[in-house]
Amino acid sequence: MLASLAAGKVWISPTAWWGDDFSALIIMELRIPRTILGAAIGGGLGMAGATMQGYLRNPLADPGIFGVSSSAALGAVSSLYFGYAVTAWLLPAFALAGAGLGMGLLALLAGRSGSLILFTLAGVILSSITGSLTSLMISLAPTPFATAEIVTWLMGALTDRSWDDVWLSVPFIAAGMLFLVATGRSLDALTLGEDAARSMGVNVRHLQWLAVLGVGLTVGASVAVAGIIGFVGLIVPHLVRPLAGHRPSALLLPSALAGALLVVLADSFVRILPSASELRLGIAMSILGAPFFMALLFKMHRELA
């Protein structure tokens, strides 16, 4: 995080961080909020990914399967489509509202059974619906400027984020991570199977709500201020699992720390690239995540062959 403060198109020496010149202003008002935001978002997405993989008992699971990120994106796109994003806090507010609505619909679609299969199908349906509505808004955008704003925002970035974004998102991300930590012991029991977990006293419906609230708050707040940053929740648990062990509860905190590290490093990298405009963080994570996902699929294919 300290290295991230110095990195950029213009490198700023630590000796200039606490002065009263323009360099100190850049550090205090732009780079510190951006670094804190990157660490919080990475930590939340990393822990959400570890929780999802433990809950669904699928190493390819990702927080996006809930449909919460696409619901938050739909809310943000709605604010851009209807022109409400002229006020700085309205776009994040719409995104958080979209995430909350998505969580409610997910719980409604999943029903009261707590079934993992039903829950997964509900997430897929929600992702499909919200993704389609987002594409519809892009195609029917009233002006080319609105279309460009929507597409640019969906790419995901931490560019020009301020303290207001930190105060808006970090409390929600922290609250979501508390819910995710509370799932740890139940996730350990769930590794023995759903029926075995129930026989050990795990309330699967309660576990489902904790997972929904935790992932909804972390992913929703992240999308609200940074757009869609994918693959963090997929990559990070696989990187730390050989070091932390295969018990889901032991994977939560290391995944949060590794997620924070990954996003901060990636954001620092996109800032120092010698390009005319800054590469969007969401694109950088996709370039990194897609080959990782393919390698993971080939590895699983060889193990099953």
Image (cartoon, rainbow, N blue to C red):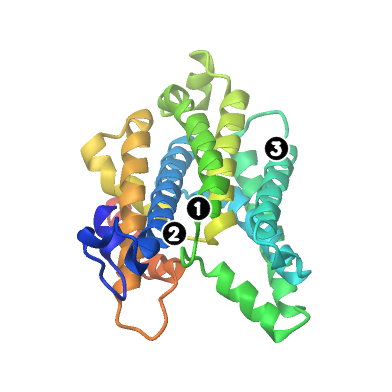
User: Which residue is at a point 48% across and 20% down the rendered structure image?
Assistant: 196
Residue type at numbered disc 3: Ala
Quarter holding the C terminus? bottom left
Q: Nearer the viewer, residue 137 or 28?
A: 28
In the foreground, 288 or 194: 288
Examine the rendering and report whether any part of residue 289 can be seen: no
| Mark 2 crowd level (few <14, some 14–19, many ≥20, 10 Å Cα) | some
Q: Which mark is residue 107?
A: 3
Above or below for 34 versus 269: above
Q: Is residue 29 above or below residue 140?
A: above
- Pick the front one: 106 or 71: 71
Q: Earlier in the sequence, mark 3 or mark 2?
A: 2
* Mark 3, secondary structure of its residue: helix
Q: CA distance from mark 1 to mark 3?
A: 33 Å
Q: Is residue 143 visible?
A: yes
Res 129 quadrant in image: bottom right
> What's the residue type where badge 1 is placed?
Trp
Q: Which residue is mark 2?
A: 29
